[in-house]
């Protein structure tokens, strides 16, 4: 990572923290929607299309041009949408087939998976202090998540480790999308707004097509009546926030700090999930969850301090030269 990258834009860091907040809020809201009101696959499918009008209008307003202006590399855009769709599908099925405790442990490994994907795909050097921060983030996320979930009484164990394997594939799919979106579309002078809108749109179309097939096989998956107002509000939050603004901020952050470091910030999502669940769904916050959140913050802040030092040294060398 270069000196310029080490001194990442504060806006990118703030955006990644907001992303973690929005994604964290998605966890209890998705659980509430899927268990009380709507089919989980329907929620997974529709949330990517909800933000499309907002992102389209934002793209028009900020860029003064249509995001559909040509030429467009549609094969690559749809491949990126497929990566996003793969994450959503494998994540949903993985959670369904996995024991919650094992799923929490698997999901806490996202910084490790992101680092390995970046190393294999683009030979990206890791930032100074990344591994201590990653270890603290994984341990902290595990503490938060393990204390927030309770083992199922069902037969998730009958599937062995299929659910955890699918969750690993889901995280690898998201890292692939994040890396390839920047590698393929940024050199075309695409803004992060345009990247987010077109890839989310294609991902939403693909997921909704898959859901249409599932609904044709099993019509009970389709909602038979308009959901109550709280469900509509949560679905709007999931779409506009978690699948719209959050992905926009994520892509912006990735373009500045890279996927591995951005994933460290996303490790804060379980912390925000616990806070949202406590504020709006009556859950309690434990000392173990607080300790886990502190570990994540210590790792992230330590790495940021090391990067700031590196940036200052690089700037001092440039002044001398």
Image (tube, rainbow, N blue to C red):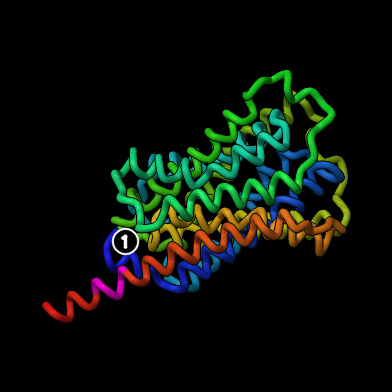
Secondary structure mainly formed by the magenta segment: helix
Left or right for 249, reference 126: right
Question: What residue is at 45 percent from the left and 53 percent from the top?
Answer: 132
Q: Nearer the viewer, residue 67 or 258?
A: 258
Which image quarter: residue 311? bottom left
Q: Is residue 197 visible?
A: no
32 above or below 160? below
Nearer-the-camera pick, 54 or 101: 101
Q: Position of residue 100 (x, y in %)?
A: 72, 37
| Vertical arrangement, residue 269 with respect to residue 39, above or below | below
Q: Nearer the viewer, residue 300 or 242?
A: 300
Q: Residue at x 45, y 45 (%)?
A: 114
Segment tinted magenta in the rendering: 310-314
202 is higher (above) or lower (below) than 295:
above
Residue 283 in percent (x, y) is at 84, 56
Q: Residues within 10 Å of mark 1 (few under 14, many from 20)?
A: few
- Residue 320's spot in the image, x, y percent? 14, 80
Query: In which quadrant of the rendered image does the C terminus lie?
Result: bottom left
Which residue is tagged 1?
Answer: 189
Taking the magenta stretch, the answer to whether it contains residue 300 is no
The total of numbered circles placed on residues is 1
Query: Residue 109 appears at what percent x and percent y?
Result: 54, 42
Q: Is residue 60 left or right of residue 91?
A: left
- Residue 4: name its quadrant: bottom left
SS at badge 1: loop
Quarter the N terminus occupies = bottom left
**Residue 27 as seen in the image, left or right of residue 259:** right
Q: Residue furthest left?
A: 321
Is 265 in front, or is 140?
A: 140
Q: Please say if 149 is above or below 268.
A: above
Q: Residue at x 47, y 72 (%)?
A: 11
């Amino acid at each position: 990572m270069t000196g310029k990258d080490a001194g990442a834009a504060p806006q990118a860091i703030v955006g990644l923290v907001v992303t973690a907040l929005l994604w964290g809020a998605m966890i209890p809201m998705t659980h509430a929607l899927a268990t009380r009101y709507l089919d989980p696959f329907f929620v997974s499918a529709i949330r990517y299309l909800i933000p499309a009008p907002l992102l389209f209008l934002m793209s028009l307003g900020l860029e003064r041009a249509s995001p559909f202006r040509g030429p467009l590399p549609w094969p690559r855009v749809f491949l990126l949408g497929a990566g996003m769709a793969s994450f959503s599908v494998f994540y949903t099925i993985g959670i369904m087939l996995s024991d919650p405790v094992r799923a929490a442990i698997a999901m806490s490994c996202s910084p490790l998976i992101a680092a390995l994907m970046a190393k294999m795909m683009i030979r990206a050097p890791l930032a100074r202090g990344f591994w201590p921060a990653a270890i603290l983030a994984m341990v902290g996320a595990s503490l938060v998540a393990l204390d927030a979930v309770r083992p199922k009484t069902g037969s998730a164990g009958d599937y062995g480790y299929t659910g955890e394997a699918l969750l690993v594939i889901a995280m690898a799919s998201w890292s692939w999308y994040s890396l390839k979106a920047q590698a393929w579309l940024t050199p075309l002078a695409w803004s992060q707004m345009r990247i987010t809108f077109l890839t989310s749109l294609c991902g939403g179309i693909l997921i909704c097509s898959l859901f249409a097939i599932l609904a044709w096989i099993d019509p009970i998956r389709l909602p038979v009546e308009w959901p109550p107002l709280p469900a509509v509000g949560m679905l709007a939050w999931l779409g506009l926030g978690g699948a719209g603004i959050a992905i926009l901020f994520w892509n912006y952050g990735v373009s500045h700090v890279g996927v591995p470091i951005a994933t460290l910030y996303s490790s804060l999502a379980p912390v925000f999930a616990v806070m949202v669940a406590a504020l709006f769904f009556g859950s309690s916050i434990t000392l173990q969850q607080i300790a886990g959140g502190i570990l994540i913050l210590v790792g992230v802040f330590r790495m940021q301090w090391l990067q700031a030092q590196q940036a200052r040294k690089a700037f001092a060398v440039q002044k001398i030269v």
